[in-house]
Image (cartoon, rainbow, N blue to C red):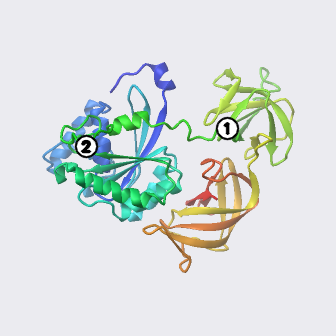
Amino acid sequence: MTALKDNSYLQMDLLRFTTAGSVDDGKSTLIGRLLYDTKSIFEDQLDAIEESSLKRGDSYVNLALLTDGLRAEREQGITIDVAYRYFATPKRKFIIADTPGHIQYTRNMVTGASTANLAIILIDARHGVVEQTCRHSFIASLLQIKHIVVCVNKMDLVDFKEEVFEKIKKDYSEFSSSLSVPDIHFIPISALLGDNVVDVSENMPWYKGGTLLYTLENVNISGDLNYQDARFPVQWVIRPQSNEFHDFRGYAGRIEGGTFNVGDEVVVLPSGFTSKIKSIEMLNEQFQQAFSPMSVTMTLENEIDISRGDMLVKKDNPPKVSQDIELMICWLNEKKLQVGGKYLVKHTTKEVKCMIKEIKYKVDINTLNKKEEDLTIGLNDIGKILIRTSNPLFVDDYNKNRFTGSLIIIDEFTNETLGAGMIL
């Protein structure tokens, strides 16, 4: 693997990206090629892949086996579960979520894309834009992924023809004009042969853009986080009650938006009490400033009753405090969503009970049209609903803050995660 110094590695920028596309578009092969060509595979892993490829009767080293970890995946040659892989180059660290292409695994795609900065949408050059291309692009847009790289794969099977790539680019551009994705790139590749993945393709001299790795290393994600609206959900109250820290009372959690400075005046929700930040600490170090998504411990100048689920915010831009919440829901469970049903809601560090008040419509993911005549939301469905919670939540719109604008719905008896919601 590429050797990197410890300090520089820790300070490197991190890009989370997901791969999506229809079945057999080559998602797992692409990731395998990325890992192989960036020398991010251990020798024993490569030996195991070569051995598995021989057993399967493949005439080449099947790099897709790097991410197809389940036995059922290897046997069928498909991706079922979300597979996460990690690698780094001298410019950036990466976390990859390889998501499945089958319609029945839409929930897995939602899971993999929920934390991603960028989505790679693979399109088979022979088939062009298909139903799953639209489905996965819509989900990426719904989850506020601001960067999409459309990789037109298997260009070797269409003789690397420029007109094939340009037609797919035109078709996808027309479809994506209705999506809220500000940054879209198009790259013609062959994941199997490595064209334009890490190295520039000699077979497509007509393509003048960068390779996939170059795009991943250089895409600008610094402006994607919300640094304006300060949000600090309290995850844990630290009270050592030891001789050394007898009077210490700290509030630990992850900053989910904005910046906090020592001396800033903050408001505690839901009580509304105000105080000033006395100190910001992390790993026995003191900081004058902290920002999203740092995990820190804060202390305040005043003794205020604060517990898990409370939130520290700035007075000039507080979140919305509400019990009636409208959201887009991705249903992840075989149990259907029930109007009038009672569930648990987990929002940041707060857990409350809720009731489903209304299903407003269901989305036809293939056409992006609203289906108001069919209000049954089951496994893999996406719809707009209204819920009422037992206690107020401190929320933002999802397109403003992905962390304070999202929640999950839980079965209060089995603790199963039933749905993932984006607050409107």
Say what secondary structure mark 2 lies in.
helix
Which residue is the site of mark 2?
Answer: 63
Query: Can the viewer see residue 79 in this picture?
Result: no
Position of 315 compared to 339: left or right? Answer: right
Query: Can the viewer see residue 319 in this picture?
Result: yes
Position of 363 compared to 277: left or right? Answer: left
Which residue is the site of mark 1?
Answer: 258
Q: Amino acid at mark 1?
A: Gly
Q: Nearer the viewer, residue 213 or 335?
A: 213
Residue 48: x %, y % from top left: 24, 39
The residue depicted at 66 percent of the width and 72 percent of the height is 358
CA gap, disc 1 to disc 2?
41 Å
Which quarter of the picture shows residue 329? bottom right
Residue 300: x %, y % from top left: 81, 31
Q: Amino acid at mark 2?
A: Leu
Residue 175: x %, y % from top left: 41, 61
The residue depicted at 33 percent of the width and 63 percent of the height is 130
